[in-house]
Amino acid sequence: LLPHHSRQTSSPLSCCHPLRIHFGQIDKTRTYQTICRGWVQGSDGEWEWEEDDPNFVPAVTTTTIDTSSTATPQLPSGKLKPKQSLGQNFLKDPNTVAKIVRAFHDDATNRGNRPGKPLDSIVELGPGAGALTDRLVTNYGTDVLQCIEVDPRSVEILGERYPSLLVHHADVLQVNYPAMAEQEGQPLVIIGNLPYYITSQILFALADASHYGAVDCATVTMQWEVAQRMVAPTCCKDYGILSVVFQTYADVRCHFKIPPTVFYPQPKVDSALVGLHFLGPSNLRQRLAGVRPQDFRNVITTAFRQRRKTVRNSLKKIPGIEADELKAKLDSLPVPLPQSVLNAQNTGDVFALSQTLPDNWASKRPEELTPAQFIEVTRLLFGSRTTDRNEESQQEDVPDLGRKVWRKLKHGI
Ligand SMILES: C[S@@+](CC[C@H](N)C(=O)[O-])C[C@H]1O[C@@H](n2cnc3c(N)ncnc32)[C@H](O)[C@@H]1O
C-alpha cells in the first residue's frame, strides 16, 4: 500500500490525456440554438449556459480567490461556462457550502463506524469550480483530499489553484473504488454535490464498493425526490428500489433541503443533502443472511417493475428459476428465519425484527414488504447460497459488484 505523500505521482486514476480547455465566451465557430432562457445548444449538441451570472462570477483571477471560511464560491469569468450535459449546477451560496461541509464533518467523524477514525482519505466527486473543494482544502489540507472530475476545464482550474491537490481527470462511474481504498490503506469518505443525471448510478457504485469495505460514508447532494425515495418507509408512495437497497446497505439520513436559488444556474427542482453510512462487509453479510447480492437486486428490481401488481404476479417472470419451481415457491409459506437473524431479533435489532414474512406474503404489493422481508423473499426463491462458506469464497459472490465499470467511456476521456 502506498502512503499518502506518494499519491501525487502514483494514482491508478491519473489521466495523461491532454486537457481540452475552453476559455472565453460562446464559440463563434459553432452554431447555437436556444431552447429555454439560459441554456444554448451548439451544433455539436453540447448545452452551455449562455451568459455568466454577474453576482456569481466577479471579475477576479484565480490568484485572488479567497478560500477563507466565509468566502463566496467564485469563478474566473468566462472560464467555466456550466454544461448541462455534465449536470453542472455550481454552488454559489457560502452558507450552504458551510452547512454541507459541517454535515460532512459530522458524518465522517461522529456517526456510523467513523468515531475514532482519522479523517485522511476524503474523496470529492465532481468538484467543478471548487465551491466545496475550497472549504475542504481550508479545513483539511490537500494531503488528505483527492477529487474526481470529468470536465478538463475544472481539472485545469483546480490544478492551477491547488498544485498539490490530486485531481483525477476521470468519470466517477469508471472509478475502481476498492482499488482506490486499497491504495489509501483505508476506506474512503465521500463528499460531493453530485451531477444529478447519474445520481443513482453513483450511489449504486458506492453501495457495491461497500461489499469490499471501500467506502465508509458519503455525504452527497441529490434531487429532493431521490432523497425522499431513499428514506421512504414501507407503504409510502416513494418506497421502491432505492429505499430497499440503501436502507439495507446503509444507515441513510436526509440532512436538509436545499433550494434552487443557491445554485448557478438554478435547477428546476429542490435538492437535499443526504448522509449514508455503509454497513461494511461483515455487517452487510450478516444482514443479507446468506442471500447473494445479485439475487437480492434481481428480486427487488423485478418486483418493483410492476409495483401495482401483487408480489406473486410481479415475480412471475423473474429470471433464474424454472417456471414450475417458481410457481411452487410463489405459492409456498415463508421459510424459517436463519439462526443469525433470530439472534439479531433477540438483541432488538430493528432491521431483523422486520424480517419475518407473513404467510400471505405473495399476495402483498411490493411496497408493503420491508427491506428485510425482501431478503426473505430472495432466500425463499434462490436459497441461502453463502451461509456455509468462508469469507474469502463469499467474495466470489460479488465478482461484478464494486469492481464493475458502470458505463463505457464517455466525455472523451
Ligand atoms: C453539480 S456540479 C457540482 C460542482 C461543484 N462541486 C459545486 O458544488 O459547485 C457536478 C460536477 O460533477 C462533474 N461531473 C459530471 N459528470 C461527471 C462524471 N461522470 N464523472 C466525474 N465528474 C462528473 C461536473 O463536471 C460538475 O463539475
Image: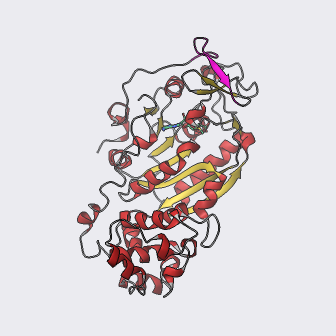
- List x then y, in percent, for residue 140: 53, 42
**Residue farthest top in this picture:** 29
| Residue at the image position 43 percent from the left and 68 percent from the top | 299
Dividing the image into four quarters, tell me where ligand 1 lies.
top right
Residue 279: x and y in percent read: 45, 64
* Residue closest to the eye, 173 or 135: 173
- Say which residue appears at 57% left-offset and 20% top-offset: 43
- Picture coordinates of residue 199, whole percent (x, y): 54, 48
Residue 8 horizontal/vertical position (percent): 38, 32
Q: Nearer the viewer, residue 185 or 91?
A: 91
Viewer-side residue, 177 vs 201 = 201
Residue range corresponding to the magenta coloring: 23-35
Regarding residue 28, the answer to whether it shows in the image is: yes
* Res. 247 visible in picture: no
The residue that appears at 66% across and 53% down in the rendered structure is 224
Image quadrant in which the C terminus is located: top left
Magenta stretch: dominant SS? loop
Look at the image and say whether residue 150 sits in the magenta stretch. no
Q: Along the line of sight, which residue is nearer the eye, 322 or 3? A: 322
Q: Quadrant of the N terminus?
A: top left
